[in-house]
Amino acid sequence: MKRISLLFGLCLVCAAAMAQQAKYVFYFIGDGMGLNQINTTEYYLASVKGQWGFDRLSFADFPYTTYATSYSANRRVTDSAAAGTALATGHKTRNAMVGMNADSVAVTSIATWAKNAGKKVGISSTVSIDDATPSAFYAHQVNRGKYHAIGLDLAASGFHYFAGTDFHKPKEGENYDMHQICADNGYTWAFGYDEGKAKWKQAEKLFMVQRKDANRAIPYAIDRTAIDLTLPQIVEIGINTLTNNNKKGFFFMIEGGAIDHACHGRDAATAIHDIIDFDNAVKVALEFYKKHPKETLIVVAADHETGGIVPGNGRRDLNLELLQYQTCSTNEVTAKLTAMKKNRMKKTWEDVKQVLIDSYGLFTHTEVTWREEAELREAYETAFEGNAKEENLYAVNSALAAKAREILNKKAGISWASHSHSAGYVPVYAIGVGAEKFHGRLNNTDIPEIIAKIAGYKK
C-alpha cells in the first residue's frame, strides 16, 4: 500500500512539473534595443499625446523585469553575431562567429533543443533572415559574412517557419539559388502577407518574405507602404503556421532587427517607429497568451545597445514631440536628395529646403536658427557640388540629410555617443509560465538556459 501511495505521489509531482512547463515560447529580441531606447520611446509616446511623464510599451509592463550583460568572449563591446549566439545557445563566443563557441566548435541552439523535444520552430526578423542574430539559431559558421554557407545551414535546419527580409544574396551564379534550395527542402514560399495568409494551412514548412513587387528588404517602419510586411503580420502568420496540426507546442524567435540599423544611423525617430512596430508584434503574442495563460511564456530581450542614446542633452526638458514630424528615415531623405542632384534643373536651396520641411518638419514645426540654417546651406553646397557623405555600418547618407537629422535630434533633446554598439546593460522582460525565474542580474547566456528549463527542453 505504501508503494502504491509513493508511486501515486510521484505521478502527481511529475504531472505538476509538466503542467508548469511552457508549451508555447515566444522569444523576442530587439536588436540594439537598450534601456534608453525603450525609455526614449515611452517618453515620446507620452509627448505626442501632450501627456507628462511616459506612456507604456506593452512589454515594458511585464511583471518580471531585469537586465543582462552583453560582452562577448573576446570583446567587452559585442557584435550581433556573438550576442545572438549567446542568446541562442548559452555560449559566449568571439565577435563575428555564429552558432559556435569561442574555440570554433559548433554548438546547438535553443531552437534545436525545442525541435528535438517535438516542438515546431519559427525564426523571423525584419532584416535579412541570414543576418547575424537569426542565423545564430540555426547556423554554425566562423564568420557571420559567410552567407552562402549560412543559407545552406538554414535550408537543412528543418525548422517550420522562417519570415522577414529575404536572404542577403538569394541567387548568385547558376549553382546557388536559395529559393530553390529551400523549396527542395520542403519549404513553401509566400511572397507577402496575403500569400502567407493563403498558404499557411497547406504548408508543412513556410517561408514568408516581401511581395515580389515591393522592395526586397523590409523597409523601416517609418518608410513602409501598405504592401510591405510588418513584424505583427510576421508574428500572426507564424502563430498560425506553428499551431497548425500541432499539439506539442512551439518555439518562436522574433527579431526586431532594424532598430539596430536605425541606431547605427543615429536616427532617433526611425528607431522609435521600429520599436513601436516591435511592441505591436509583442501585442499579437500577448493576445495568444491571454488564450493560453497557463501554457505560454513570452520573453523580450536585446542582444546589445547601439549608439549610446540618451534622452537628454544638457537641457532641463525634452521636446520629443518634435520627432513626430519626421516622415521618413534619413536613408530615404538621402534618396530624395540624390534624385534631386541628378536632376540639374532642381537643385536650388529653396527646393532642398522644402525636402527638409517635408521630411523632418524643420522650419515649420521645429524652429531653425539662422546659424543652423547657415550650417544646412553649407552642407547643401558641399553635398551638391561635391560628394560629402556620412557613413555608418548599414548606410551611406548625404551629409545634408545627416546635418538635418542632427539638428532635429538636438532640438528634441536626444544625445548619441557613437554610430556603433556599446557595452550597456540590456533589458529582459518576461510574462507567463515560469516568468518569475527571470530575476537578478543575468548574463546573456543565462536567458536560453532559463527558457529551456521552463519549457522542458534538453540540450
Image: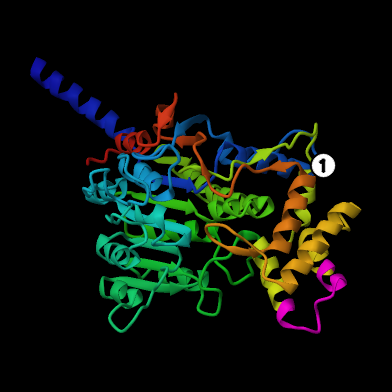
Above or below for 137 versus 16 = below
Magenta stretch contains residue 53 = no
Task: Evaluate whether residue 48 shows in this view.
Answer: no
Q: How is the image coloured?
A: rainbow
Left or right side of 181 for 283: right
Left or right side of 89 for 238: right
**Residue bounds of the magenta highlight:** 340-353
Q: Where does residue 274 sit, x and y in percent of width and height?
A: 60, 54
The residue pinned by badge 1 equals: 50
Residue 177, located in which quarter of the rendered image?
bottom left
How many other residues sit within 10 Å of disc 1, few (<14), some (14-19) or many (≥20)?
few
Which amino acid, by three-letter code, is at mark 1? Gly
Q: Nearer the viewer, residue 198 or 401?
A: 401
- Disc 1, SS: loop
Query: Which part of the image, by quadrant, shows the C terminus?
Result: top left
Residue at 27% in and 55% down? 140
Q: Where does residue 70 sit, x and y in percent of width and height?
A: 43, 37
Query: Which part of the image, by quadrant, shows the N terminus?
Result: top left
Residue at 22% in and 40% down? 458
Q: For the image shown, how many numbered marks are present on the structure?
A: 1
